[in-house]
Image (cartoon, rainbow, N blue to C red):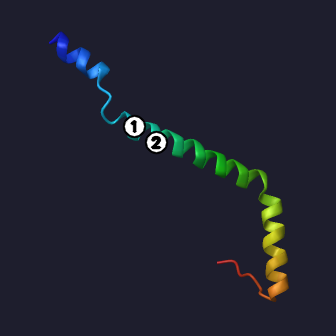
Amino acid sequence: MMNKMKALLTEEQGQGMTEYGLVLGVIAIGVVGLLVAFKGKVLAIYKEVTDALGVTPTNP
């Protein structure tokens, strides 16, 4: 029984996928943070492009 418990604690199979998942999660949080921080600038660029194209954006 003790051997099984030790094996569970030292088993490394599947650990790589967990690490990749954590890294992707941190990247996603960073991207969302950047979008929130630069929200005004992104909206200004969007408005500038739509004005240049003569497109009237609609709100769904």
| 42 w.r.t. 56: above or below | above
6 or 29: nearer the eye?
6
Q: Position of residue 60 (x, y in %)?
A: 64, 78
Say which residue appears at 14% left-offset and 12% top-offset. Answer: 1
At label 2, counting other C-alpha atoms closer than 10 Å, the crowd grade (few under 14, some 14-19, many 20 or more) is few
Left or right: 27, with 45 as reference point: left
At label 1, counting other C-alpha atoms closer than 10 Å, the crowd grade (few under 14, some 14-19, many 20 or more) is few
Amino acid, disc 2: Tyr
Left or right: 54, with 7 as reference point: right
Q: Residue furthest bottom?
A: 54
Q: Position of residue 57 (x, y in %)?
A: 74, 81
Q: Position of residue 47 (x, y in %)?
A: 82, 75
Question: Circle 1 sits in a helix, a strand or a loop, which is it?
Answer: helix
Say which residue appears at 32% left-offset and 28% top-offset. Answer: 12
Looking at the image, do the residues carrying marks 1 and 2 touch, with CB atoms under 8 Å apart? yes
Q: Quadrant of residue 45?
A: bottom right
Q: Position of residue 27 (x, y in %)?
A: 59, 46
Residue at the disc numbered 2: 20
Residue at the disc numbered 1: 16
60 or 42: nearer the eye?
42
Q: Residue furthest top?
A: 2
Say which residue appears at 23% left-offset and 16% top-offset. Answer: 5
Amino acid, disc 1: Gly
Q: Quadrant of residue 7?
A: top left
Question: Circle 2 sits in a helix, a strand or a loop, which is it?
Answer: helix
| 16 w.r.t. 36: above or below | above
| 46 w.r.t. 5: above or below | below
